[in-house]
Image (tube, rainbow, N blue to C red):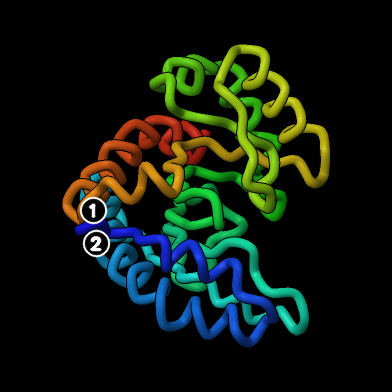
Amino acid sequence: MSYWTQKDFDVFKKEGLEARMQGLETQIRPKFHELGAQFSDELAAKLGHEMFPHVAKHARRTVNPPKDSWVAFAPYKRGYKALPHFQIGLWESHVFIILAVIYEAPTKTAIADKLGKKMSLITSLPKDYVISGNHMKPDAEAITKSTTAHYLQRLATIKKGELVIGRHLSVDEAATLSKEQFYTYVTDTFDELLPLYQKMTELN
């Protein structure tokens, strides 16, 4: 039995804020809470400090229904957006397992500088990893030296610049994975991204 089903992705086809939020609440969030408990403990064990799960609430929305949703992981209980963070989430088209630095992060220029000196942490990732500069859009590109340099420059110089790196599973690919197989996939992805996260969060 697959962990993600077509019914999960169909939540994002529901018309209207109330209907979609209801679908998220009943269909998707129980899995996000489950994933949050599992992988906050797993990440904490590997990093040597506490990691807190943050399931998206979409609380500020009053009209437009969310086009994606997620659980994020960061070492701060009250929030994650100002810090490099991991996410597991869904768009209508795919599951994403990512590491992100978004525009709210006050250290993003310093992070871009660190990663610019150690680009191989990104470019040596396996071929199915992708990169983007906007966590609010589903698209991403293959990781190359040029795409990496492009997004690092944007992260450093543009106020809204972001860096999002990880793996996507299409609806059809996700449907082939049992819960155990999906958990293994997430573990493997986070393990590959941990050196990058540790570089991002170095104090010097």
Is label 1 in contact with label 2 (beta carbons under 8 Å)?
yes
The amino acid sitting under disc 2 is Gln
Query: In which quadrant of the rendered view does residue 62 lie?
Result: bottom right
The amino acid sitting under disc 1 is Glu
Q: Is residue 74 visible?
A: no
Residue 38 in the image, given as x and y percentages of width and height:
24, 62
- Rendered view: 123 above or below 15: above
Query: In which quadrant of the rendered view does residue 147 lie?
Result: top right
> What residue is rendered at 36% in x and 36% in y?
194
Q: Which dot, 1 or 2, sits closer to the camera? A: 2
Quarter in which the N terminus is drawn: bottom left
Residue 96 in the image, given as x and y percentages of width and height:
47, 47
The label number, if any, that marks residue 52 in the structure image? none
- Rendered view: 59 above or below 162: below
Q: Nearer the viewer, residue 77 or 102?
A: 102
Describe residue 155's horizontal placement relative to residue 81 as left or right.
Answer: right
Q: Secondary structure at mark 2?
A: helix
Separation of residues labelled 1 and 2 (CA atoms)? 6 Å
Label 1: few (<14), some (14–19) or many (≥20) C-alpha neighbours in 10 Å: some
Label 2: few (<14), some (14–19) or many (≥20) C-alpha neighbours in 10 Å: few
Q: Is residue 204 visible?
A: yes
Q: Nearer the viewer, residue 13 or 48?
A: 13
> What residue is rendered at 67% in x and 13% in y?
146
Q: Which residue is mark 1?
A: 42
Residue 51 in the image, given as x and y percentages of width and height:
35, 59
Describe residue 15's horizontal placement relative to residue 159 as left or right.
Answer: left
> What residue is rendered at 45% in x and 68% in y?
54
Residue 101 in the image, given as x and y percentages of width and height:
60, 45
Which residue sits furthest right?
158
Q: Which residue is mark 2?
A: 38
> What residue is rendered at 30% in x and 54% in y?
49
